[in-house]
Amino acid sequence: MTRILLSGCCGKMGRFVAAAVAQRKDCEIVAGIDIVDDSTLGFPVFANYDEVEVKADVIIDFSNPSLLPAMLSYAVKTNTGVVLATTGLTDEQIKAVEDASETIPVFFSYNMSIGVSLLCELSKVAAKVLGNGFDVEIVEAHHNQKLDAPSGTAIMLGNAIKEEMPDAYFEYDRHSKREKRHTNEIGIHSVRGGTIVGEHEVIFAGEDEVITVSHSAASKRVFAVGAIRAAKFLPQKQAGMYEMKDLLAEEN
């Protein structure tokens, strides 16, 4: 039985995780962290990490970047692994996560969907095969309440492609320029509207042909399920950084 401490338990994603865990018999949420105390969740909710009175095997974090220092401090102090699913982290915060991973295992992904992990791998294969003969564009769409743009997933896709195209760079503001597209650009475009859960499309545009790979999430539940799989994977792992491809390699 995997004992989970759920950070951001009263938020939208926290509630999806709680609902998904409730349907399983191999894990349980022993406590939550949130400024809102909802007694209907079925587990104790603490306002901050200093108040936590239970021991967990792993933390699932779907909270806010501002809570990252307190969460990492608690995780290192209690030797608790972290599944980090919070988006919008700065480069400095990511460096803090990497520093913590020298002491504890950290599962970090911009997107917890198994399908998005596959999309990354397919995009890398396409970039390797097509090379610089095709222009690459990434289009992502999310609901109108999302704070960060572009999405972390779009950046993750771009970084995966850059592994095969090391001279490429991200272009976010083409609208501000009046010039032809450069060969080694990776254009990244953000759409915000309505209740779109998450859509990502990678376009490889060549001479007289276009290849497109894409992923669409119909519900936030897919991210909750992925985070729970990561939480089951992480305990007993050595300190270090882990991602979805590590989980899939072990499961397969």
Image (cartoon, rainbow, N blue to C red):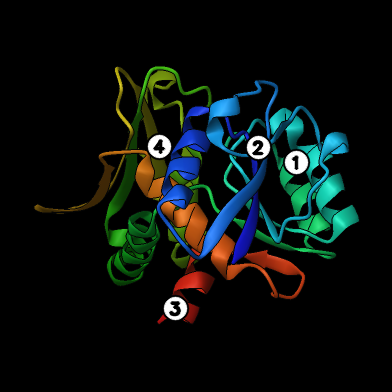
Residue in the foreground of this view, choosing between 163 and 197: 197
100 lies left or right of 230:
right
**Label 3 crowd (10 A; few <14 / some 14-19 / many >=20):** few
In the figure, residue 197 lies in which quadrant? top left
For label 3, the SS is helix
In the figure, residue 33 lies in which quadrant? top right
Instruction: Specify which label sits upstream in the sequence, 2 or 3.
Output: 2
For label 2, the SS is loop
Q: Which residue is mark 1?
A: 93
For label 4, the SS is strand
Instruction: Specify which label sits upstream in the sequence, 3 or 1.
Output: 1
Alpha carbon distance from label 1 to label 4 = 22 Å
Q: Is residue 243 at all visible to an observer of this figure?
A: no
Q: Which residue is mark 3?
A: 251
62 lies left or right of 223:
right
Q: Is residue 79 at all visible to an observer of this figure?
A: yes
- x%, y% of residue 174? 40, 27
Alpha carbon distance from label 3 to label 1 = 30 Å
Amino acid type for the residue under numbered disc 1: Gln
Q: Which residue is mark 4?
A: 188
Above-or-below relation of 33 to 2: above
**Of marks 4 and 3, the one in the foreground:** 3
**Of marks 3 and 1, the one in the foreground:** 3
Point out the image quarter for the N terminus: bottom right
Amino acid type for the residue under numbered disc 4: Ile
Q: Which residue is mark 2?
A: 89
Residue in the foreground of this view, choosing between 91 and 24: 24
For label 1, the SS is helix
Alpha carbon distance from label 2 to label 3 = 28 Å
**Label 4 crowd (10 A; few <14 / some 14-19 / many >=20):** many
